[in-house]
Image (cartoon, rainbow, N blue to C red):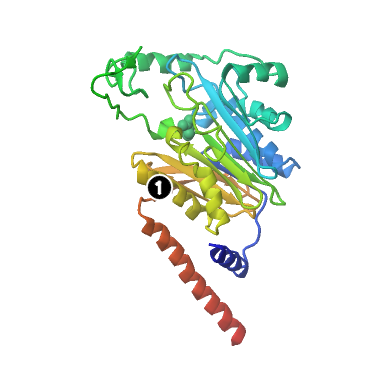
């Protein structure tokens, strides 16, 4: 692998690619959040400031972020919106995060205070709310809106379908709770809880003009989650990961599965071992898909010198946005999900890049010799 890394660095140098920094990359089509984060970088803010502001934009304006981030849109089985958020500083590898925070809108700002003012990494639930009120000075607010109430009522009208229960009685695929453990036949609940519209966490990586990396994620989680559920977004290595020595990554998708695989960490480790960001993210997702073929998710990755990519699995396509000195504004596009469970696809992509390199080296040598 070390040889592979040296090789990739060498290829990067001989290809003469310039460093294109600062850079912001964001999951889904969130151009305002991208622009907000980029503006922080270009006005002298740090990469940590940038990722905080990008997420805060979505928390303040959930309607601009597909109602999947912030106080409005997704509610738990009690009809309450609770938020998960994290920030990771690639300079120190320090993390601040909150899980299942209640009645507070700016979850990422609370995470930032955990990062800056405590030696902890993750605060949860009502006590995270107390920290937000007493230490951060944020207002405690009722996060219920007419839209939240509508989402909750129509779910109840559908017999609480879908939901996240299994092996309980009454049969969760047809009934609302309360449930109790089933001591009879196991009741497996394969009803579709995943859909593109149930997975729109903002994940963000920012790299400042000298290569300092930060990452963040913020979400209201999954619709109709069981109260108390915390997803991947506040978990370091799952929701996001950053290390100045390499770069950063952030994830969106089925968090209950991603927590088990740490795809953001895996993507950064893959980049450390020489893979480009897209190949690195594809490999991280392939590892999940092999064990959970029904899984849906996407990972963005960026290196500390501004190379970036995205991979996705289970959706037809996903969107992402970037902003850098060349883009002239937030640049969002669709990507077709092409991760497969076969390792050969990954090996083929490495083989292809070796082949292209051999051609480039030959061309470069010929140009010098003749
Ligand atoms: N990853 C999030 C979660 O499971 C969902 C999402 O990406 O929207 O909480």
Residue 278 in view in this figure: yes
Q: In percent of the image, x 52 and y 58: which residue is there?
A: 275
Tell me if 273 is positioned left or right of 335 in this view.
Answer: right
Q: Is residue 362 above or below residue 16?
A: below
**Which residue in the rendered view is the most extreme toward the left?**
185
Q: In percent of the image, x 65 and y 26: which residue is there?
A: 110
Q: Is residue 86 above or below residue 345?
A: above
Give how far across and how far down residue 121 sits, in percent. 63, 31
Q: Is residue 271 above or below residue 171?
A: below
**Which residue in the rendered view is the most extreme toward the front?**
183
Residue 2, quarter of picture: bottom right
Q: Is residue 93 above or below residue 145?
A: below
Q: How many marks?
A: 1
Residue 28 in view in this figure: no
Give how far across and how far down residue 310 sits, in percent. 49, 48
| Pick the front one: 192 or 232 | 232
Tell me if 271 is positioned left or right of 120 in this view.
Answer: left
Give how far across and how far down residue 352 sits, in percent. 44, 66
Give how far across and how far down residue 83 sits, in percent. 54, 24
| Pick the front one: 333 or 210 | 210
Packing grade of label 1 (10 A; few <14, some 14-19, many >=20) is some
Residue linked to disc 1: 337
Residue 274, quarter of picture: bottom right
| Pick the front one: 332 or 252 | 252
Q: Quick one: SS at disc 1?
A: loop
Tell me if 83 is positioned left or right of 211 in this view.
Answer: left
Residue 51, quarter of picture: top right
């Amino acid at each position: 692998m070390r040889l592979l890394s040296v090789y990739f660095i060498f290829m990067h140098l001989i290809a003469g690619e310039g460093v294109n920094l600062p850079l912001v990359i964001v999951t889904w089509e969130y151009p305002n959040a991208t622009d907000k984060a980029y503006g922080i970088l270009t006005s002298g803010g740090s990469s940590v400031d940038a990722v905080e502001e990008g997420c805060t934009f979505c928390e303040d304006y959930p309607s601009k972020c597909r109602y999947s981030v912030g106080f409005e849109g997704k509610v738990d089985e009690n009809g309450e919106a609770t938020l998960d958020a994290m920030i990771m500083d690639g300079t120190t590898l320090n993390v601040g995060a909150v899980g299942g925070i209640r009645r507070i809108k700016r979850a990422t700002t609370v995470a930032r205070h955990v990062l800056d003012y405590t030696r902890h990494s993750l605060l949860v639930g009502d006590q995270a709310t107390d920290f937000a009120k007493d230490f951060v000075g944020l207002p405690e607010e009722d996060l219920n809106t007419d839209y939240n109430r509508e989402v909750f009522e129509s779910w109840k009208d559908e017999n609480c379908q879908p939901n996240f229960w299994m092996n309980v009685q009454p049969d969760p695929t047809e009934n609302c709770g309360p449930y109790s453990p089933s001591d009879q036949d196991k009741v497996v609940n394969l009803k579709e809880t995943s859909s593109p519209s149930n997975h729109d966490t903002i994940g963000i990586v920012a790299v400042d003009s000298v290569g300092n990396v930060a990452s963040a994620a913020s979400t209201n989680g999954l619709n109709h989650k069981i109260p108390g559920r915390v997803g991947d977004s506040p978990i370091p290595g799952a929701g996001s990961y950053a290390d100045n020595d390499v770069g950063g990554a952030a994830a969106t998708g089925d968090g209950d599965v991603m927590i088990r695989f740490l795809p953001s960490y895996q993507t950064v480790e893959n980049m450390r071992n020489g893979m480009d960001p897209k190949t690195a993210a594809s490999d991280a997702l392939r590892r999940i898909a092999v064990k959970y073929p029904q899984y849906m998710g996407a990972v963005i990755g960026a290196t500390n010198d501004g190379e970036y990519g995205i991979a996705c699995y289970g959706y037809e396509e996903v969107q992402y946005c970037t902003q850098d000195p060349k883009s002239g504004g937030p640049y969002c596009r669709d990507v077709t999900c092409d991760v497969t469970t076969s390792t050969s696809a990954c090996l083929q992509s490495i083989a292809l890049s070796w082949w292209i390199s051999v051609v480039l080296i030959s061309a470069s040598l010929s140009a010098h010799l003749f």
